[in-house]
Image: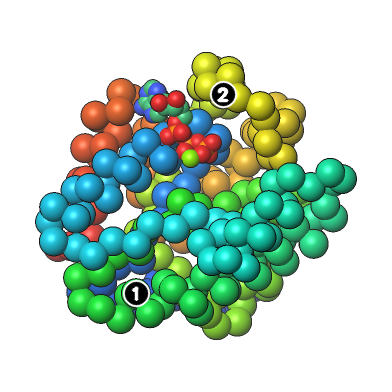
Amino acid sequence: MSNSYNIDPALLERFSSFKSKKSFLLSFEGIEGAGKSTQIIRFKDKLEQDGYDVLLVREPGGTVFGEHLREAILHSESPLDPIAEAHLFASSRAQLLFEKTLKHLERPNSVVIYDRYIDSSIAYQGVARGLGVEKILEIHAHAPLTTLPQKTFYIRISLECSLKRQAARNQEKDYFESENNNFYQKLIDGYDQAQQLFPQRFSIIDGEQDIDHVFSQICQAWESLLL
Ligand SMILES: Nc1ncnc2c1ncn2[C@@H]1O[C@H](COP(=O)(O)OP(=O)(O)OP(=O)(O)O)[C@@H](O)[C@H]1O
Ligand SMILES: [Mg+2]
């Protein structure tokens, strides 16, 4: 497999999407304010109405161990070394896969929805923090971290849109939200790189449309997965 980012093809081949026709591993990605939480709540409702048993998880977190790591990362008083940050996220992710996700997916008609997954690591630690995409893939190159979603809904908004929505929310900024504009532009570039490495898994959703239109695009992408 060739790719435009000089990633070792043997490394990429270690990853594969979760394989099942009866249960589904899904992720939502996008920068702050993209609308992930807004859409996930609606989408989870829809799936439950359709008869699926849905587990919704967020990263870092989702297990007691992972929630401790989440606190440590998001409220760190001093900047974390990027490699420390990347390993903390990967630790939380591995524990969640081991403790909950893979067990849940053993049941038929089950869905696990991730509010952020590996593409956030690629965008945040790989590109915005400068570790490089390959380093993030290397950190994830062992099971269970090699399990990728069957579908990733990337809700794409511009930097300007994110800043506007963050200002409207008017909350105290957390660890990542206090970063500057240059950081956010790198995040957008990072998600674009992830999408180019894993084009089949990604559906790009225009997150600047109104909430109903965004939702109907997500549903369309989901329906096409079921075909
Ligand atoms: N399509 C949309 N149009 C206008 N406003 C939106 C849209 N989607 C979400 N919003 C608003 O933008 C804000 C951020 O949305 P939301 O919390 O869903 O984003 P998020 O991607 O989960 O962000 P974070 O990464 O910070 O958790 C909320 O106030 C929400 O109501
Ligand atoms: Mg959210």
The residue located at (82%, 52%) in the rendering is: 80
Q: Position of residue 171 (x, y in %)?
A: 60, 24
Distance between the alpha carbons at the discs numbered 2 and 1: 34 Å
Residue 221 seen by the camera: no
Q: Position of residue 68 (x, y in %)?
A: 66, 60
Q: Position of residue 21 (x, y in %)?
A: 21, 74
Which residue in the rendered view is the most extreme toward the front? 64
The residue located at (26%, 37%) in the rendering is: 215
Above or below, 88 against 171 in this view is below
Q: Which quadrant of the figure has residue 180?
A: top right
For disc 2, does the CB lie below 8 Å from ligand 1? yes
Few, some or many C-alpha atoms within 10 Å of disc 2 (few <14, some 14-19, many ≥20)?
some
The residue located at (23%, 65%) in the rendering is: 53
Question: In front here: 195 or 174?
Answer: 174
Residue 169 is labelled as none
Amino acid type at image mark 2: Gln
